Each structure stands twice: as structure tokens, then as C-alpha cells.
Amino acid sequence: MVHQKVIIQNDLGLHARPAARLAEIARRFKAKIYLKKGSRQVEAESILDVLALACTKGSEVEIWAEGEEAEEAVLEIARLLSQQIV
């Protein structure tokens, strides 16, 4: 299992467009990928679940992945969430 913490940098937080992009990226990998904010954990492949985390700018999110391609998945999603403009 691979995990990494990331601070949301986008001024609008993790809104619909970056959530859709994140889910699209998650579906490309064979790994099972999760996002965690506080005590809530969701599957990264679900746009609605990602939006339900209500991540605003400055929110700390933990990315977890397990299985084949887990490390690559975490790195790519962390890169997406660390961008100021998505």
C-alpha cells in the first residue's frame, strides 16, 4: 500500500472539473485508489464521492492506493491536487 498527503492548492478547491479529472486518472490505473480527508474515505474513481469530501483550498487530503501501479497512481493524483489551476 502506498500513500501520500497533499494540500489542495486550487483556489476553488476540489470542484467538479478537477474531481472529474481525478476520477478519470484513477480509472486508468489497475490499482485501487482512495482519498481520505479527516475521517472520511472515498474511492477516487467516483466523481460524486470525491466531491462529497468538500475539499477547499488548503484542505489536507491523503491519497491511498494498493495493487499494481499503486505508486504511479498516487504520484499522478498528488501532482494533480498540488496544481494551483486544474
Image (cartoon, grey):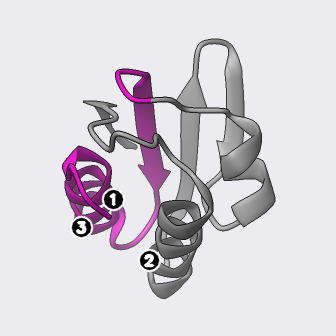
Amino acid type, mark 2: Ile
Q: Earlier in the sequence, mark 2 or mark 1?
A: 2
Residue hosting label 1: 77
Q: As rendered, which of 43 and 6 lies closer to the eye?
A: 6
Does the residue at mark 1 contact the one at mark 3 (Cβ under 8 Å)?
no
Camera-side mark, 1 or 3: 1
Please say if the residues under marks 2 and 1 sit with CB atoms less than 8 Å apart: yes
On the image, the x and y values in percent for residue 70 come to 35, 61
Q: At 77% from the left edge and 50% from the top edge, which residue is drawn?
A: 49
Disc number placed over residue 69 in the picture, else none: none
Label 3 is placed on what type of residue?
A: Glu
Residue 22 place in picture, x, y as percent? 48, 66
Relative vertical location of residue 84 with respect to residue 56 in this rendering, above or below? below
- Which residue is disc 3 drawn over? 72
Q: Nearer the viewer, residue 30 or 59?
A: 59
Classify 10 Å Cα crowding around label 3: few (below 14), some (14-19), many (20 and above).
some
- Magenta stretch, residue numbers: 57-86
Q: Which residue is mark 2?
A: 25
Classify mark 2: residues with Cα within 10 Å, few (<14), some (14-19) or many (20+). Answer: some
